[in-house]
Image (cartoon, rainbow, N blue to C red):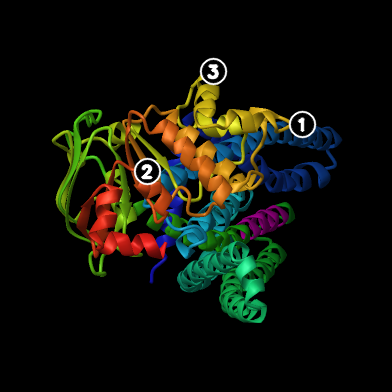
Amino acid sequence: MSAGPIVRFVIRSASWVGKYPGPAVVIALGLILEAAFTASVPLAFRMVIDRAIVPRDTTLLVTLVVAMMTGVVVVAAVGLWRDYLYARMCSLILRDLRVEIFDQLHRLTPSSPGSEENAGETAHFSTDLAAIEHAIVSAVPWALLPGLDVVIGTTLLFILEWRLAVIASLVFPLALIGPRLVAPHASRASRDRKNQEASVLSDVQESISARQTVRAFRLEEAMRGRFAGRVDDLVISSTRTSFLGALVERSAGIGILFLQVVVLGVGALMAFEGLLTIGTLVSFQALFMTVSWSLSYVTQYVPNLVVASGGLQRIDDYLAAQAPVVDLPGAYPVPRCSREITFEGVVYGFPGMPPILRGLDLSLRAGERVAIVGPIGSGKSSILRLLTRMADPSGGRILIDGHDIRGGTQESLRRQIGVVFQDGLLLNDTIRANIRLGKIGATDSEVEAVAALVGLHDLLEQLPHGYDTVVGPRGERLSGGQRQLVAIARAVLRDPAILLLDEPTSALDPYSDRIVRLAIEHVSRGPTVIAVTHRRELAAEADRVLVVKDGRLVEDGNHASLLRAGTLYSRLWWES
């Protein structure tokens, strides 16, 4: 493995800075000014010693000291302004990265709550971005400014005494060979550690969501052992990464320290022989010390680059992932459903797995209330998944009023669909804000109207803050029935042509179930309603029941006729 990841990180950093040319130019000018002044101080030693102290020129001595003090004040003021601009630019760069990752998160297929994939996505926002932030924030004091000091200082060394400068130039191979050999291994170790950190985070998220199960089955020791194993792997990976990072720094520092002694000895000998003045020797040695330690700073910064390059590689891999559904070139607006929804020979499944839907054919008339039932794993939820284009079928097609939805835009399709999921997930915001998610910009009267339609208005009047009640993370401050009523109101606020219900009452108690079913009854007059359910009461209230088994439609009729037929539906009815 080469040093490619580090080089790639440096190039990407330059592209990020290039988005803000104004502040970048000011920052660059400030760095040049500070580096030039830093290099001028050792040069002043030569003038102070050879032209002021030795000939005892008090006027020149005072002039030089005052000039240097003035320079310190000016450079400090410029440095403060530069630091502010750089801090703001770094914040803007990180904002852009966070937004880019956030956009990708919503382009990719949603994962199940608490899954390892979700933990990896979370790690991009935490550990990966933290590593990048540390690298770019510390770039000025640990890389850019020391790098300028090295360039300017080396040039001045050759101007002062070229023979001694040739020996001093050996500092570069001594400082760079070690890091060049070690850095690729450190970069690989850093990426491995990031993956281990994501695995640990995944275990933590799993444990948080499964605490009740763990306690109920007395799995504390088993879960602790599993977590300890993950952490032990992280210890090994972290140790390797930290050691290799320290080795990068150590390999450079030893060579620099050795050469400083050599240069001092040779310079002292030359001064003893009268080949250079005492002032030149002091000035050269001070300047070489500045160059050496600036170079040391740069090499110490390399471990930050190593860690950041690992984080960037993981983020790049994530950003490079292809969304499962994209709009085709020339995609058209899908018309609002007014006649029918048709599935023609639809085949769908996950890669490497047997298909879930196996040539599904069905037709739904606009305005119908349809219940989809079937055994576990029969493909019921996949029908909703495909209709909302969370995925596309691998075979067959889905039509709305004769238009293949794959040829249309996702935005126009989803704009006419309202969805109520099983968990009724809400954001940690007010009830009013959660309902308004169905139609951004809806007025308070529109929000309250749909709340009244689903029977939520009277319930909210019993809460201290009514519509402005904050629901808590995932809506945990509301009961299951209240969450579902808010989710139904949110879906209805869209004025959907198609209303999809994915097991909307499966997790509710009988009382809440009746309230939610009543709400569904009220909102089902107008849109095409498709409900995936295993609750027989909800199926019995539908105009039509579709029975799916092994990815195919096996029964189609109303509740009463299917119940009399004594086939699969009747068995599901009596077993539920």
Circle 2 — which element? loop
Q: Which residue occupies 58% across, 41% down?
A: 482
Circle 2: residue type: Glu
Q: Position of residue 491 (x, y in %)?
A: 44, 34
As displayed, is residue 138 above or below residue 438?
A: below
**Residue 292 in magenta?**
yes
Circle 1: residue type: Thr
Q: Which residue occupies 48% across, 36% down?
A: 519
Q: Point out the frontmost of discs 2 and 1.
A: 2
Q: Position of residue 112 (x, y in %)?
A: 45, 58
Circle 3: residue type: Ser
Rounded to the nearest angstrom, the CA distance separating label 2 from label 1 is 87 Å
Q: Position of residue 26 (x, y in %)?
A: 56, 31
Label of residue 541 in the image: 2
Secondary structure character of the magenta stretch overall: helix
Label of residue 445 in the image: 3
Label of residue 70 in the image: 1
Q: Is any part of residue 73 visible from this angle?
A: yes
Q: Point out the frontmost of discs 3 and 1.
A: 3
Q: Quadrant of residue 378?
A: bottom left
Disc 1 crowd, CA 10 A, few/some/many (<14, 14-19, 20+): few
Q: Which residue occupies 57% across, 60% down?
A: 304
Q: Which residue is at the front of the view, 267 or 439?
A: 439
**Residue 6 in magenta?**
no
